[in-house]
Amino acid sequence: MASNIHRRDWLKQSTLAALGIGFSLRSLGGEDYLPRELGSETGLINLGSNENPYGLAPGAKKAISDLISSVHRYQYNIPALQTFRKELAEYYGVTVDHILVTPGSGEALNLMARAYSQGNLVTATPTFGILPNTAKKIGVAVKEIPLDNKKIHDLDALLKAIDANTSQVYICNPANPTGTIVQPAALKAFCEEASRRTMVSIDEAYIDFLDAPYNESMLSLVKSGNKNIVIIRTFSKIHAMAGMRVGFILAHPDTIKTLAANYFGNSNFCMSALSMTAAMASLKDQSHSVSSKQKNAAAREFTTKSLQELGYHCIPSYTNFLFFHLNNYQGDFAKDMLAKNVLLRSHDLPDGKWCRVSIGTMEEMKKFVEIMKGVPK
Ligand SMILES: Cc1ncc(COP(=O)(O)O)c(C=O)c1O
């Protein structure tokens, strides 16, 4: 009985969240929780948060177990962890002064919203919610520029929206929730122009799912000395560390210094020892990322093709999630799917109802497609 009530409350919360355009903090799981009885033992197919379904890299698991006997110490007293920022810096070809680590990139986005809150924020709609929602929460005006009809960032319109009072532009590329990308050359030209006028934050959470030539990071602009470009990265996606909370900012040392001023001592102080050791090991165990990426691409292709055969319009995805139009679906799709043990997100946009489904394992996506066959359109 008690668990039924829990489940109902949670259903209600997720449904409310799913109704929002874009992502609210609540829909991110910020205030949601997954009741134990809805765990995988009950057959729930969790396709709601764009996680890596293949789990941690073996090297990361080993690093955690190797460090477990040291975690009665603070992380700054564990010699093996002192190289975390250095290793990240070497991996990305920058200096340690270009990096600020954060407990998850959500914290980096929160930090950016607060650090650049003196004027308006320009961003797309729909987009990933943490930065714009935090900005709204603290009273910043947010100029939301609709994606184009292919659900791609409209860079010209975003550029036009920047005015004398703009303190920041936020671009999520690859884009969440649509899975689209902007071409690197066009994004670079946009960043160069926009950064002459304001701070530009590029959220590259899903960049590791891209193939060349699309996987070009805007980090090259930071390396060339541009102080108004900030790159936000996470270990939650390809590195399968969502529950371990590791993100980081790459930016000019002066910009990092300004952002770090909000931390007591050093932002490493907020990081878990186990998370840092796992992140370092995961960077060195690339074979797991490579195989996760390949399996994701195969499951994504299968899901896209299957949904198209069922008559759904899918936005071509470059990520580990897929955005498709729900035709004339009546009712609350996310809620109805949860009743069928599938957790995903649905959105009400001006052009109708859309679903964002994460790409799980091939087995999970086959089950999802079977369930979709019974869904009225
Ligand atoms: C685009 C994007 N940025 C940032 C995040 C936050 O990730 P985390 O806080 O786990 O690093 C997510 C999570 O889904 C995301 O989709």
Image (cartoon, rainbow, N blue to C red):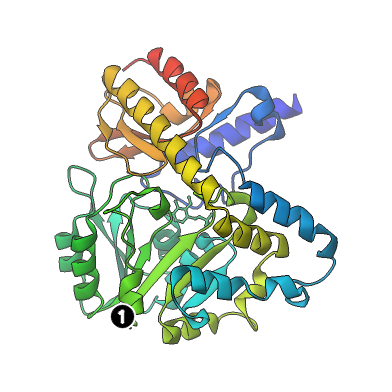
Q: Residue farthest to the top?
A: 374
Whether residue 108 is situated above or below residue 64 in the rendered picture: below
Asked if residue 365 is positioned above or below residue 268 in the image, the reply reads above
Q: Is ligand 1 less than 8 Å from the beta carbon at label 1?
A: no
Q: Is residue 190 rendered to the left or right of residue 293?
A: left
Question: Closer to the camera, 295 or 111?
Answer: 295
Q: Say which residue label 1 marks.
A: 224
**Dot 1, how many residues are within 10 Å of its Cα: few (below 14), some (14-19), or many (20+)?**
few
Instruction: Point out the image quarter for the N terminus.
Output: top right
Please indicate, yes or no, whether residue 28 appears anywhere in the rendered image.
no
- Residue 121 % position (x, y): 32, 68
Q: Quadrant of residue 309?
A: top left
At 71% across and 34% down in the image, what residue appears?
A: 36
Q: Locate the C terminus by quadrant.
A: top left
Residue 273 located left or right of residue 373:
right
Asked if one can make out residue 72 in the rendered structure from this viewpoint, the answer is yes
- Who's the residue at 51% across and 25% down the image? 364
Which amino acid type is shown beneath numbered disc 1? Answer: Ser
The location of residue 72, given as percent across then percent down, is 85, 66
Q: How far across and down, in percent of the image, does residue 16 sit?
A: 48, 39
Q: Where residue 238 sits: x, y (%)?
A: 49, 49
Q: Residue at x 65, y 53 (%)?
A: 60
Quarter assignment of residue 371: top left
- Circle 1 sits in a helix, a strand or a loop, which is it? loop
Q: Choose between 365 and 208: the one closer to the eye.
A: 208
With 201 as the anchor, is 366 left or right in this view? right
Q: Is residue 223 left or right of residue 265?
A: left
Kindly identify the residue that appears in the image at 59 percent across and 55 percent down: 282
